[in-house]
């Protein structure tokens, strides 16, 4: 299985946080939620395909305008 990259954004730009196996993604996402709960201020995470860089899931705390609460799959360009 190809690796997944989790990135974090706290100051307006994305930075790589960790690379995980798809089997451990649930644990990594839970850790991100714990970090978000402890963080003073806004924070966002995204899961990207380790090979293509495509965004697979996102999470923002607090949720940004027009975004759902918790992890969600962002709308892909060209999707209806």
Image (cartoon, rainbow, N blue to C red):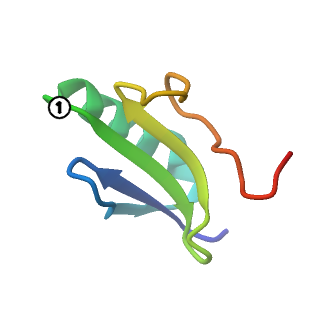
The residue depicted at 52 percent of the width and 48 percent of the height is: 25
Q: Position of residue 13 (x, y in %)?
A: 29, 60
The secondary structure type at the circle numbered 1 is loop
Place of residue 52 in the rendered image (x, y in percent of width and height, measured from the top left): 62, 76
Give coordinates of residue 48: x percent, y percent: 54, 61
Measuring 17% from the left and 31% from the top, which residue is drawn there?
Answer: 39
Q: Which residue is mark 1?
A: 39
User: Relative to 3, is 7 on the left or the right?
Assistant: left
Would you place residue 70 above or below residue 50 in this image? above
Relative to 76, 49 lies left or right = left
Q: Quadrant of residue 77?
A: bottom right
Q: Quadrant of the N terminus?
A: bottom right
Residue found at the very far left of the displayed protein: 40
Q: Where 67 sits versus 76, above or below? A: above
Tell me the quadrant of the picture where the C terminus can be found: top right
Residue in the image at 18% along x and 27% along y = 38
């Amino acid at each position: 299985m190809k690796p997944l990259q989790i990135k974090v954004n706290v100051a307006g730009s994305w930075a790589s946080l960790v690379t995980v196996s798809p089997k451990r993604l649930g644990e990594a996402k839970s850790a991100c939620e714990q970090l978000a709960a402890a963080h003073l201020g806004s924070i966002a995470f995204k899961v990207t395909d380790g090979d293509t860089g495509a965004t697979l899931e996102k999470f923002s705390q607090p949720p940004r305008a027009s975004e759902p609460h918790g992890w969600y799959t962002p709308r892909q360009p060209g999707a209806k």
